[in-house]
Amino acid sequence: MDQSNQSHLWRHSLHRFAVQQNGGVFWFALLLFVLMLMMGGLAVDLMRYETNRTRLQQTLDRATLAAASLTQGLDPEYVVNDYFAKADLDQFLTSVVVTEGLNFRNVQAVATAEMHTKFMHMMGINQLRTNTASTAEQRITNVEIVLVLDVSGSMQGTKLANLKTAAREFVDTIISSDPEERISIALVPYNGQVNLGSVLREKYNATHVHGVVDVNCIDLPSDVYSDAGMSRSLPMPMTGHVDTYSTTNKTNGYVSATDSNYAKPNALNRWCPPSAVNVVRLPSHDISTLQDQIQNLTAIGATSINAGLKWSLALLDPGSRDMFSEFVTASHIPAFFSGRPFDYTDSEAMKVVVLMTDGEHFTEERLGNAYRVGLSDIYRSSGDGNYSIYHATKSGSSKYWVPHLGTWRSTAWNSGSGVVRQTWPQVWTNLRVSWVAWQLFARALGADSAGRNAQYTDWMQDIRVQTASTVMDSQLQQVCGLAKDNGIIIYGIAFEAPSLGRAQIESCVSSPSHYFDTTGLEIQAAFRAIASNISLLRLTQ
């Protein structure tokens, strides 16, 4: 083969190779293009999927957080649905589960969406499924409750029985739902006064201590109603064991000191009746202990709603924390209640008062300070038990008035077995104030009927200090305001109460929905509703 033919064959072979190679590159390029398209489509579909998933998850998170908030009063499930509806995603919400208890709210929600792919179907993937879930919980870990219960004389009989049934059930409902021991319930029974019991009373600076067993009430100074707390250093006189209320026969003649109708104290009219059961129960988590005390309550005395509520605040005020620590150390309250009362601003604590009454304020009476303790000028014969009194202002040497004789003597009356100068607590143990004011002062110092009556009025006003019911109303509302300002939730139950009593309770509560006007067995329904409301936490805190 000559050289020209060889050259031609060579060029022809190169051409054929080039043609063959160009075809392979094309198909290879096409394959690369398809792969790139699929990868790009995969990225696009995945980006769409992630965008949709993120939007769904964020909506779900916002919805559950809002629904779980204890400060909102809407139905939690409605809140979640509303969030999804406004985001135009409501078709994807598949379930909402709400769990609520006394001190918590848990909201769990699930949303599911299916996205049709635009490119991944080339790989056999027609849909991408988005499954999202969110759980939000808000919990108040500590709850402090005080039941302020009216045990005045008008509660006797069926009313007290109905109260006991309702309050005992309330305790069981609340405490049995708290296995974590985060809830405390204290009891403040009240009538004309609040009997603190010796353990609590000894924590305060009580003056004029008379030593009468089971009489542990304190006459609160008026200025304590301007503060939510209760000072432990403020001097406060103990309530006298005295009958300032019962009247006497204002005859110019003598009425025996043993006369039950006109001289001896009426046990029902003492402002702080001796009691080991109608006393403040410190915070407890024991159902039996609380129920037993409620069951043992007795009805006696007048009505001082202001004092009842004031002492309940003392058990809720953070200023009492040191005192509670002392109670823990002495095993008067459980060790797991250490750190109580919590701060008003503690987001994990809730304070609740249930204030109940069947009456209205009754003008309060207390002893003047000069007549509480110490020696009086009154003497008692050890023989016949008759009394005489020394009057320093009487002219002459005969300064001892002897009422059963109607005469003045130079010495105290002595029937032959000796005579004992009486302390004021001894006087009030045996005599009512009105008898003393008339027989020992008015008859002795009044020259005629008008004079005797004027003397009686003056001495009664000096021995007995009164607080008008209108002042007590103002004190109550002042304390109610302090409680609400500090975030304490107040429920009120007016139980067959008169109009003035109903008005006071209705003005005190946290909102109209926290007020219950009840009769008969309705009080049980009221306590049930309060327990349910607390448990669901549909409250404004």
Image (cartoon, rainbow, N blue to C red):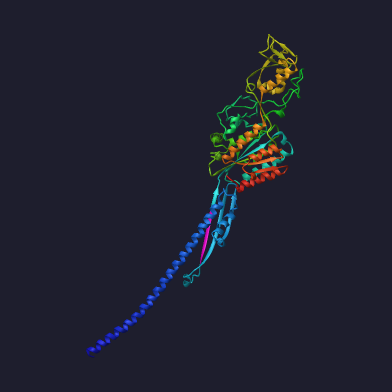
**Residue 132 in the image: above or below residue 495:** below
The image quadrant where one finds the N terminus is bottom left
Location of residue 377 in the rendering, given as x and y in whole percent from the top left corner: 66, 16
Q: On the picture, is 1 further left or further right than 181?
A: left
Which of the pair 281/249 is nearer the observer?
A: 249
| Range drawn in magenta | 128-135
Which of the pair 63/525 is nearer the observer?
A: 63
Residue 153 seen by the camera:
yes
Location of residue 329 in the rendering, given as x and y in whole percent from the top left corner: 54, 35
Residue 293 seen by the camera:
no
Q: Residue furthest left?
A: 3
Location of residue 493 in the rendering, given as x and y in whole percent from the top left corner: 67, 41
Which of the pair 197/354 is nearer the observer?
A: 354
Q: Which secondary structure class fits the magenta region best?
A: strand
The image quadrant where one finds the C terminus is top right
Location of residue 270 in the rendering, given as x and y in whole percent from the top left corner: 69, 28
**Residue 59 in the image: above or below residue 188:** below
**Residue 258 in the image: above or below residue 413:** below
| Residue 113 among those drawn in magenta | no
Q: Residue furthest bottom?
A: 1
